[in-house]
Image: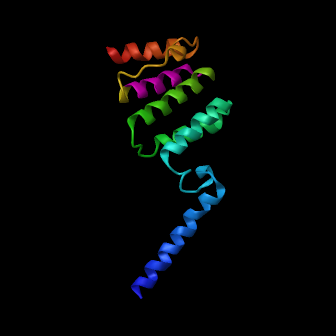
Amino acid sequence: MSSRRNVLWGLMLVWLLGGCHTLNTCDECWWYNRTPERKLSQGVEKYEEGNYIASMAALNNVLQTKLLDKNDKVSAYKYLAFIHCVSDREKLCFEAFSKALAIKPDFELTPAEAGHPIWGPVFRKAKSKIAK
């Protein structure tokens, strides 16, 4: 009886995971889309598409889960800061950068990001406040 149950569980697992093979991508798999890393990736994709509302929802969702890597959390805060800055919400932009810097004080923007006229100055202000 026990071995029959194990065979049934095994077949069910193969059936569930086999769907991803026929889809040719894990982007459509239910289990893959639920990982924090995938949610972060979706948030960044939506940001790059200019869909800030969907991006914020995905990024905030990621921040509410336990992430494996603090760099992922810093990245989520960075993109939230970018969204807040371009949406004329400087205080929220500053807060998002501050949260990223609280997690990783040596966090830096890329040269292109740091030179941005909107969020560059806000990041430098948050960085200087953390340094004090």
Q: Which stretch appears magenta?
A: 88-101
- On-image quarter of the C terminus: top left
Instruction: Examine the rendered structure and indicate whether residue 111 appears above or below residue 55.
Output: above
Q: Is residue 98 magenta?
A: yes
Instruction: Examine the rendered structure and indicate whether residue 65 appears above or below residue 109.
Output: below
Answer yes or no: is residue 37 visible: yes
- On-image quarter of the N terminus: bottom left
- Residue 6: which quarter of the image? bottom left
Is 110 or 130 nearer to us in this picture?
A: 110
Is 1 or 102 nearer to us in this picture?
A: 1
Q: Residue 95, how many percent across, how many down?
A: 47, 25
Answer yes or no: is residue 88 visible: no
User: Residue at coordinates 53% horizontally, 17% vertically from top-left?
Assistant: 113
Q: Residue 94, how many percent across, how many down?
A: 48, 21
Q: Is residue 49 left or right of residue 119?
A: right
Q: Is residue 98 left or right of residue 12?
A: left
User: Residue at coordinates 61% horizontally, 49% vertically from top-left?
Assistant: 27
Q: Residue 56, how many percent across, how many down?
A: 58, 36
Instruction: Examine the rendered structure and indicate whether residue 67 appears above or below residue 78.
Output: below
- Quick one: which residue is furthest to the left in this view? 132
**Principal SS element in the magenta part?**
helix
Q: Residue 19, how many percent across, how many down?
A: 61, 62
Q: Is residue 28 magenta?
A: no
- Quick one: which residue is furthest to the bottom in this view? 1
User: Residue at coordinates 53% horizontally, 68% vertically from top-left?
Assistant: 14
